[in-house]
Amino acid sequence: MNCYDALAPWYDSLTGDVPYPAIADFYEAEFAADGGEFRLLLDLCCGTGSMTWELAGRGYEMIAADRSVEMLMQAQAKQLPCRTPPLFLCQSAEELDLYGTVDAAVCCLDGFNYISLDALGEVFRRLHLFIRPGGLLVFDIRTPEFLRSLDGQVFVDEKEDVLCLWRADFDDKLGGLVYGMDLFTRRGRLWERSGEEHIEYAHEPEALKLLLEKSGFENVCLRQDGPQGGAGRLYIIAKRNSHG
């Protein structure tokens, strides 16, 4: 089963409670506190592009990358009002390859939890390459404690034309939360069933901090006061060093 394949057309309707404007406000506050120029941004693991379009609507030039063709199709179809339409790229985070540098990179809604710690080393190396000297990386993760708290739980999301059922199991050997998802979508008088499997790795914040510093980032800050911080979401802000 593939991740974010069958789910893509229904992702936005099932995640209508995500506070994208508040998260964008958090990013802009970090940009303002830094004092640098932030015009061209990268939205990594952009999914259906809700954050991409939110930031584009605020006047930023946006490059957005995701490995899921299906999610990118949803993102491209939105065509929301903005000065400069985003550029969407079908690339995995580990294979990020831009034409030049960006002023900052963001990744929201625990996108980095979907990447193993070993692979994150390459992700951070590439981000260091494509973020301008002195630029920022701002992302969030679900904490290990939060992911472990979901072990054994079953969740149901239901809309008029779709029902999503998923069960979460924490795998200690894997070091992450594995959840199988069943989607039931209406097809006339019938319902069609499809399935996906997702894995979110439980990254220790201090391990990520060390990995970022090893990759050439500095001033790494861990914040729990961002949007959804009370729901186990930890924000990490790092500055790309001014040399190298």
Image (cartoon, rainbow, N blue to C red):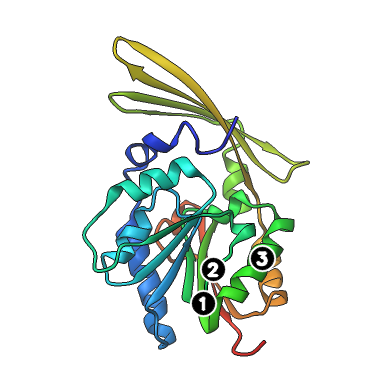
| Tags 1 and 2 touching, CB below 8 Å | yes
Spatial CA distance of label 1 from label 2 is 7 Å
- Res. 142 in view: no
Q: How many marks?
A: 3
Q: What element carries label 2?
A: loop
| Depth check, front residue: 171 or 71 | 71
Name the N-terminal-most of marks 3 and 1: 1
Tag 2 residue:
98
Q: Which amino acid does label 2 sit on?
A: Leu
- In front: label 3 or label 2: 2
Quadrant of the frame with the N terminus: top right
| 23 shown above or below 71 | below
How packed is label 3: few (under 14 Cα within 10 Å), some, or many (20 or more)? some
| 68 shown above or below 185 | below
Task: Please state the horizontal and vertical placement of residue 180, each as a whole percent of the image.
Answer: 58, 29
Q: Is mark 3 on a helix, strand or loop?
A: helix
Tag 1 residue:
101
Q: Residue 32 carries which label?
A: none
Residue at image location 47% in from the left, 53% down from the top = 109
Task: Please state the horizontal and vertical placement of residue 201, each as a whole percent of the image.
Answer: 65, 48
Q: Which amino acid does label 3 sit on?
A: Leu
Tag 3 residue:
208
The residue furthest right is 173
Q: In this view, does 51 lie to the left or right of 174?
A: left
How packed is label 2: few (under 14 Cα within 10 Å), some, or many (20 or more)? some
- Res. 117 in view: yes
| 211 shown above or below 157 | below
| Tags 3 and 2 touching, CB below 8 Å | no
Spatial CA distance of label 3 from label 1 is 23 Å
Q: In which quarter of the image is residue 7?
A: top left
Q: In this view, does 206 lie to the left or right of 161?
A: right
Residue at image location 49% in from the left, 57% down from the top = 65
